[in-house]
Amino acid sequence: MEPNFFIVGGSKCGTTNISYYLDLHQDVFISELNEPYYFCKWDISNDVRKSMITEEEKYLKLFESAKIQKAIGEATPSYLHSPNSAKMIKERFPESKIIISIRNPIERAYSGYLSNELREKNNQTFREMIDEHKKMIDERKFFIYNILEPGFYSKHIRRFQDDFGSEKIKVIIFEEYIKKTEETIESILDFLGLDNKIDFVEQPKMGYRKPKNRFGKIAFENNFVKKMATAIIPTVTRQRIGERFLLEETKKPPMHDDDRQFLKNLYERDVRDLTSLLDKELPWENFRIEK
């Protein structure tokens, strides 16, 4: 069996949570590996590729357990902002449907920073990372872990529309999703052409997390340990170990007001374009248009 739908992003916009609920449906199969990154491979360097699936044979094995399901998919948020992902998905699986979840780009960027710090721990401040990643954008250098690039939603959604057409794309607003989760999941099942009833069991929506103990700190901050774990432990197993034993949810540190204002200025034009593109008023207080 081969995939026929993709949750392409955005990152830090609830895609894992959406995957969990869709996977409850008897006619849906979701890849057990979260974020295989396969369709990012045309945009990333060889050193980054080492931790991702780049061979089609290995990629298709992710779906070999799907036997009777009608909707077969995977979720890789980085597909949304990877320049060639839309084109390559269309080329290989042309009849696919695309699901996109978007979130206030200011909050998304901050969550991206916190995630990067957990993964790399380079002790950059939020503003230092903003400046570094903004410079990459200005110089047209693609970096898959750029915390700013994913938030230019109108540009990325248009790229998928150009390849798939609007009728094969469903856009979810994260802030609406968390308030009406079951209703939104039912609408996605409708979009996939399935009966929209599932045995809905509330799943916690993971917030800011940090290492919960000394072992977690070593696992996420020691480069040698991370490389060894990547080489020895299968990706799905690593994900499960991390979620269960090494991470804990805690209160997110506050964002500085000047950083928030900088990001508001950075994304304001794109949010206006997005409002027009979706023909929808977005529930993002930072970008409210005064009437």
Image (spheres, grey):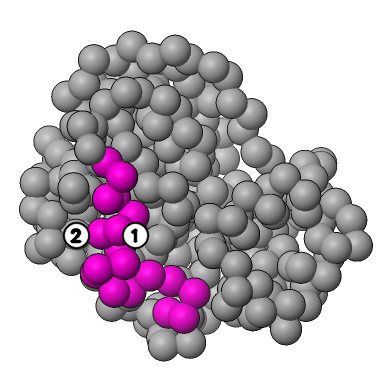
According to the image, label 2 marks what residue?
A: 89
Whether residue 136 sits left or right of residue 71 in the image: it is right
In terms of image quadrants, where is residue 163? bottom left
Disc on res. 61: none
**The residue stretch that appears in magenta:** 49-66
State the image coordinates of residue 111 (x, y, percent, origin top left). Answer: 63, 52
First in sequence: mark 1 vs mark 2: 1
According to the image, label 1 marks what residue?
A: 79
Which residue is pictured at 54% across the width and 26% down the height?
Answer: 178
* Towards the viewer: 243 or 184: 243
Q: Secondary structure at mark 1?
A: helix
Amino acid type at image mark 1: Tyr
Whether residue 7 sits left or right of residue 126 in the image: it is left
Residues tagged 1 and 2 counted as in contact (Cβ below 8 A)? yes
In terms of image quadrants, where is residue 285? top right
State the image coordinates of residue 82 (x, y, percent, origin top left). Answer: 34, 67
Q: Is 57 rendered above or below residue 243?
A: below
